[in-house]
Image (cartoon, rainbow, N blue to C red):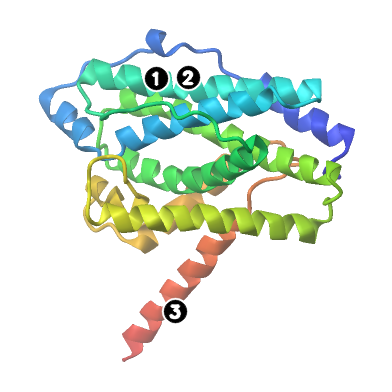
Amino acid sequence: MKAGTDEHKRRFCEDFIATHNPYQPEALPWPALDAEALARLRAIPFWGEVLTTERRAGAIVNAYAARIDDPLVRQAVALQAYEEARHARLLWLMARRYGVAVGDVRAEPPPADLYRAFADFGYGECLDAFLGFGVFNIARRAAYLPEPLFAIFELLLHEENRHIVFFINWMAWEQARRGRGLAWLRAIIALRYYAGAIGRLLGTVRRGRHAADGRDFSPTQAAIFLDGFSLRMLLEECCAEYDRRMHAFDAQLLKPVFLPRLAGFVLAGLRLGRVGRGRR
């Protein structure tokens, strides 16, 4: 379907609204954890970073929703804001229930340029989700934590999946409204935002080499979940899990494609390098 049309808007907004899960974090079946599981949960270094991100996301998305003139799009973005805030509530509840240290987590006020902040956040969420799918799959397969806890975290990942599909379609619709609907022009705009998101991630990786306080976590620290971890393993898991999750969505909706393609190029390079070393 053509991006930017009323049919496109109706499809991506109504699909997002219809798939909302009205669960409440307080009513979830939180499992009792033994001493080993508690120690493993508390050893994960990124809880403070994730909680800070979710609180900031809720504030940005909620503030931007109030600026949207289209009623249907505003309703969908406001629903996303609610879900982002609920993620923060769920993580805070988990931290209190299991004694997980999250540090001094404070909600930052939304920036003045809400459109840019929402777009930056959306592309950053695409990157975080792509990498998060792989990390989650590695940890789950390794049974790093009890399965009932993974089932709760799956609620968050499923919503992140919905968010990035909604965002990519919203971005295409918004760019068409601004006279930038040509595919090549949208691709250039997306590349600029992705470059910013990747740059921020690389900065986090550099800081994470010198600090492990939970506020500078990077996906490269996923090695805590599995012996023999490697970048190739992570990227293969990310691509496979991303592809599996994207198949659950309406085939006519746009999907984020830049990151799996980039990961595919990196994997091809890693495999060629391995073949070259094997011939020496």
> Distance between the Cα atoms at labels 1 and 2?
6 Å
Q: Which residue is mark 3?
A: 272
> Distance between the Cα atoms at labels 3 and 1?
43 Å
> Distance between the Cα atoms at labels 2 and 3?
44 Å
Q: Which residue is mark 1?
A: 90
Instruction: List the single residue furthest toward the top.
Output: 27
**Residue that appears at 26% across and 52% down:** 223
Whether residue 123 is visible: yes
Seen in the picture, residue 248 relative to 259 is either above or below; the reply is above
| Rendered location of residue 156, percent (x, y) | 46, 28
| Rendered location of residue 246, percent (x, y) | 60, 42
Q: Which residue is mark 2?
A: 86
| First along the sequence among labels 3 and 1 | 1
Whether residue 1 is visible: no
Q: Amino acid at mark 2?
A: Arg
Tell me the quarter of the image containing the C terminus.
bottom left
**Residue that appears at 45% across and 43% down:** 133
Left or right side of 257 for 214: left
Q: Secondary structure at mark 2?
A: helix
Q: Secondary structure at mark 1?
A: helix
| First along the sequence among labels 2 and 3 | 2
**Circles 1 and 2: CB atoms closer than 8 Å:** yes
Q: Amino acid at mark 3?
A: Leu
